[in-house]
Amino acid sequence: MKNYKRHLITSALPYANGPIHIGHLAGVYVPSDIYTRYLRMKGADVISICGSDEHGVPITLKARKEGVTPQEIVDRYHFLNKKAFEDFGIAFDIYSRTSNKIHYETASQFFRTLYDKGEFIEKTSEQYYDEEAKCFLADRYIVGTCPHCGNENAYGDQCEKCGTSLSPSDLINPHSTVSGSKPVLRETLHWYLPLDKYESWLKKWILGDHKEWKTNVYGQCKSWLDQGLQPRAVSRDLDWGVPVPVEGADGKVLYVWFDAPIGYISATRELTPDWEKYWKDSETRMIHFIGKDNIVFHCIIFPAMLKAEGSYILPDNVPANEFLNLESDKISTSRNWAVWLHEYLEDFPGKQDVLRYSLCASMPETKDNDFTWKEFQARNNNELVAILGNFVNRALVLTNNYYDGRVPERGRTDQTDESVLAEIAVLKNNVSESLENFRFREALKEAMNLARLGNKYLADAEPWKVIKTDPERVKTIMNIALQITANLSVICEPFLPFSMAKLRQWINYGKPMWEDAGKTDLLKPGHKVNKPELLFEKIEDEAIQRQVDKLLATKKSNEAASASAVPGKQPVTFDDFSRMDIRTATILEAEKVPKTTKLLKLKIDTGLDVRTIVSGIAEHYKPEDIIGKQISIVANLEPRKIKGIESKGMILMAEDKDGKLVMVQPETKVNNGSTIK
RNA sequence: GGCGAGAUAGCUCAGUUGGUUAGAGCGCGUGAUUCAUAAUCACGAGGUCCGGGGUUCAACCCCCCGUCUCGCUACCA
């Protein structure tokens, strides 16, 4: 690897519409923090950058729902999360935010540079517009009835009741959430970054020059590049965000994906007047810590932006992690299925390192991983307490008992002593090497091996026995045990900063420097060590049970919520009702639509005619099983082309709470075309 | 449907360019020990390396066909 002068570490900007949870921590912030602390201990010139991502539609929606301003929402979560990170010991040099003035300046300037260089394509397209409120509507601002499940409050991009992804034109009776009026299509101008222009350059840069990136990262980049890149809009019609700094662009802001990564730059500007040194000097090594959902932005889009601007450096690595599950279920903010950092800090005061350890030990480095409270407890009790805490305790207790807390002289060493002393340096190098390759689980394990080494050494040397026969020998043994202890306080520092600070206080050790790790004379003879307290304490079953119960309660209330019936709908006139042509029909033929997962192409006899209907039921029915079945259809729905096939009508299905679809059938066979009323 | 990643001991994971008896930690069992928070140390049991083909003297590893999980993407009237 090239020898860099300095490091710029970025951690994905958390979106300021919710609190931080263990998934964020395990995926991004714990590894970024360990890495940053490691570099600092090596004396490297390093800055670690993070902040809140505060723009985008979901925040405006949440604000609207609560009847407050977007600024109030982002203030709430920005300060909550900033404090939680601080309390948790995440060592950012700055935790900034994208609603800052300096970010507005930076982002505008960035856009303007690209604009002036002619790097954008201008294009008009049709978008939904609210004539009453006089604004364009993001998909999220359009609500209507989901054609799939009948939920009246489905959004223009997704129905949250049935999870179907939609487009605004899909909604039945669409209306704007701003004014309630019916949206109309209107032309709007936007700027696009022509990613296709950078395709061959990106191919060389990533596929050619960065073969060392993690397989998940490399694979996903390759997938995107192989499929071919498309121009991507960098602006939106919205009033929350950085205004597009171009004449006549009123009501347009930078699209949040364009805006957010620039937040790394503005945060650096806020931190130091020397920011350009970190962003524009090829001697700087930039690393992005992110989760897998962010790979394409950080590996393809942001680098293309930086390249287009021209004066910036590019990331040297993007060690993206997979996702963390919680008790076998996907973590979900909306379903409240999470362990929230700010709650953990309250429930387990002083136990930051336990969570840091547990999340590092089961970090989703190569595939999704599962966090369970039982494992959390076991990691604490069987590893932190039993192996690390216990070793430190026995070394210090013996030293206090035998030598009144003074480090004894190391006398003549035998072969075992020498190999133990040599092993310290070996383990230190193992930790270094693992960290430098972003293998955090492995690094942590090697660090713990040092405590194991200490335990084994004491068990083999048996100073508590030897003291009766050969007190001189015990001095040597305890000296070595104390060198291991001191080394632990340095080597474990990136992983367990709170506990190691405590330990260093007990042994009166100064600033931990990485270069000192591996040395065998960190504590000189005569050096005073204090009486230890407990480095880690056992976590009892009750504390764990409380957390498990909390989750069970969440699960229960979620189930209750999903089992309850869909809310009733607005009354309709009989006239409205009678305009619907609902009738019985029989399926004559059924086949899967090629290259789709959910679609069946059905030929049905409606009594009036034989027609084709395409229906999204392939996951619920096999074609051969439904031929001959009598069903109910809406016969006068406007025809629509689906996957190139004209579909005339819609089959009525009942949907269960788990999303299972069941045909609505007449109780006994009736004529095809019998009206349903 | 397309693409990417993954599947190895009860659990969480290693396994280097194919090369003898597939490893570690935790858990489990047995023994030793008592300085230490009933902690520690030693030993042991546990594997159809997702399934099926193929290439090879030799496959956990390479190729082909499947299955399952996660993500991206298309699709749902």
Image (cartoon, rainbow, N blue to C red):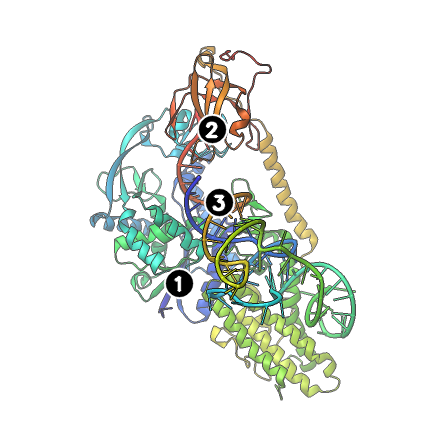
* Label 3 residue SS: loop
In front: label 2 or label 3: 2
Q: Amino acid at mark 1?
A: Ile
Pointer 3 chain:
A
Residue bearing the label numbered 2: A591
Question: Which amino acid, mark 3?
Answer: Gly
Residue A432, given in percent of the width and then of the height, sits at 48, 69
Residue A255 visible in the displayed image: yes
Q: In the rendered structure, are the residues bearing label 1 and label 2 in contact, judged by CB atoms less than 8 Å apart?
A: no
Q: Can you tell which of label 1 and label 2 is closer to the viewer?
A: 2
The CA distance from mark 1 to mark 2 is 59 Å
Q: In the rendered view, would you say A36 is above or below A188?
A: below
Name the residue type under label 2.
Answer: Glu
Q: Residues within 10 Å of mark 3 (few under 14, many from 20)?
A: some
Q: Position of residue A502 (x, y in %)?
A: 58, 68
Is B32 located above or below residue A275 in the figure?
A: below
Residue ID for mark 1: A47
In this rendering, is residue A170 above or below A121? above
Q: Residue at x 44, y 71 (%)?
A: A42
Instruction: Name the residue beneath numbered marker 3.
Output: A18
Alpha carbon separation for disc pair 2 and 3: 44 Å
Mark 2 residue crowding within 10 angstroms, few (<14) / some (14–19) / many (20+): some
